[in-house]
Image: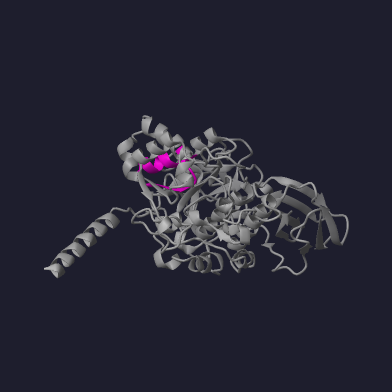
Amino acid sequence: MKSKIHFFLMMAIMAICSQVFAQRPSFNKNKDILIACFDIKPDPDDIHAVAALGSMLAHPDLTGVEYFAVAGAYGSQGGSYLQSNSLFNMAFGNNWTDAHSNRSAAIAAITSKVVPILQNGGKVWVQEGGQSDVTADWLMPVINASNGINSNTTKNNVILVQHDDGFNEGQANQSKLNNVKANTRYFLLDDGNAGWNDGWGDHGPWSTPMYRNRSNSFVDQAKNSPNSVAKALWTEADRLFNSYFPNGFPHDWSFFFTDGVDYSDCVENWWIFEIGSNADTHDKFWSRYVMNTTSNPGPNPNPNQQFFIVNRQTGKKLRPQNNADGITLIQVPASTTSNIVKWEQVNTSNGYFYLKNVETGKYFRPVGNNDGSALEQRPTSYSGNYTQWKKVNSSNGYFYLQNRQTNHYFRPTTDSDNSPMVQRPTTYSGNYTQWKFDAVGSKTSVLEDNKIAIYPNPASSQLKILGIAKQDIISVKDLSGKMVIKEVTSIEKNMNLDVSRLQNGVYVLTIKNANKNTTLQFVKK
């Protein structure tokens, strides 16, 4: 009798567990978005979490994931905010917002991302790496607006994932937290600071790894990783950490006290993307996402890489007619080489990007949805789907450029010079709708060009540049693309560049002459 009772009890438990686990949704890369929130106040673990998530986004596991990050997603806690904008730029490109400096603008930016997803039946996955105040600030107005979204929508399709019922939930505005819990699918995972067998971190059925380690070897490993994306992210994360704690982290309860790593918020990403045994320990995570040699490009792997857009049928180059907004895109002879036929790619998400003209600094888009709609130039404030494109491969290096909003290609109307561009359906698959990007000049690193070198790196006041020539153009831009230094060299071989007035951070140095461009990255400390 006891054995039968035991058998039926076990069957009942298994049925309950199966029902619980069947309730979790799965991330759909074709429809869903990740909203990654970080408080960055007052502890530095979010600095490591941002570097860790950036490393994950550069891995094939997360190819095609649409994401938007939020800095300053904090509640009522005290302490200093650890501004980390340079790291957010590196990890997320343009896909983030700063709720610390301007919360209302951040709420508007998040709303613009989540509303179309929800209206189209997708899910919004909130990685709550802090308190839920910011989430409540966009969630409740979205529910109350006349946009076709109500609480039933958000209860099914806003998936909020939290791992900390102590500090994160405890320091939230409790009224806002209750609103979030009542109007989302709220999943409280086990604490990412605790190990698999640590009872103090258990919150229910959703077990997680421990994503932290006391050893001081892991940051050094990351800063020397063969993965260039992870290497850059963790180098910047370490620079930021040291700028806030130049004498080391003072509290012995933290893994940072021994110069360890703590990216515990990323157990939420582990759970959201169902990574499972591929990274169910810190060591596996480090091997897969930080020290791996196979990764996707980062948010903008070739900043300022310039190219011509060349049509396969006509051999002509794409350009706007002039600098004005609303002007038509046309084709011009292949011999044209001025800046108005040069373009830069600005990546967004899911393989899409803006095409930015070097001369005008503007994007282009179709005027409307219909076939035959002209292509027009628009300022970069036009950042929606209409100005975003992706490559659809054809052959021999050519591809179609497909619009994110309309799903159409484009082509010149005729073979002639100054022929305008028009939008065409994807059934137009001939040479007229095919394009290629011809690079204006190669942008090599110091590892690929033994004639150019810089040191010291990091630099504090003077940056030595070796291998330059007279009349080389030296320019330095920050990670937002802002020009901060521009000089024309008057000497041969070597020069000292004064970087003492630059703010600490990562910069892109370009040496340009008639033959080529060389781009190097350095850190100002």
Q: Is residue 139 above or below residue 510?
A: above
Q: Quadrant of the N terminus?
A: bottom left
Quadrant of the image occupied by residue 222 = bottom right
- Residue 203 percent coordinates (x, y): 38, 53
Quadrant of the image occupied by residue 207 = bottom left
**Which of the pair 135/206 is nearer the observer?**
206
Magenta segment includes 175: no
Answer with left or right where residue 123 lies relative to residue 61.
Answer: left
- Residue 313 percent coordinates (x, y): 52, 57
**Which of the pair 187/174 is nearer the observer?**
174
Q: Residue furthest right?
A: 491
**Which of the pair 126/423 is nearer the observer?**
126
- Residue 263 percent coordinates (x, y): 53, 57
Answer with left or right where residue 305 lies relative to residue 351.
Answer: right
Magenta segment includes 113: yes
Stretch in magenta: 110-131
**Residue sitting at x 64%, y 42%:** 360
**Which of the pair 467/151 is nearer the observer?**
151
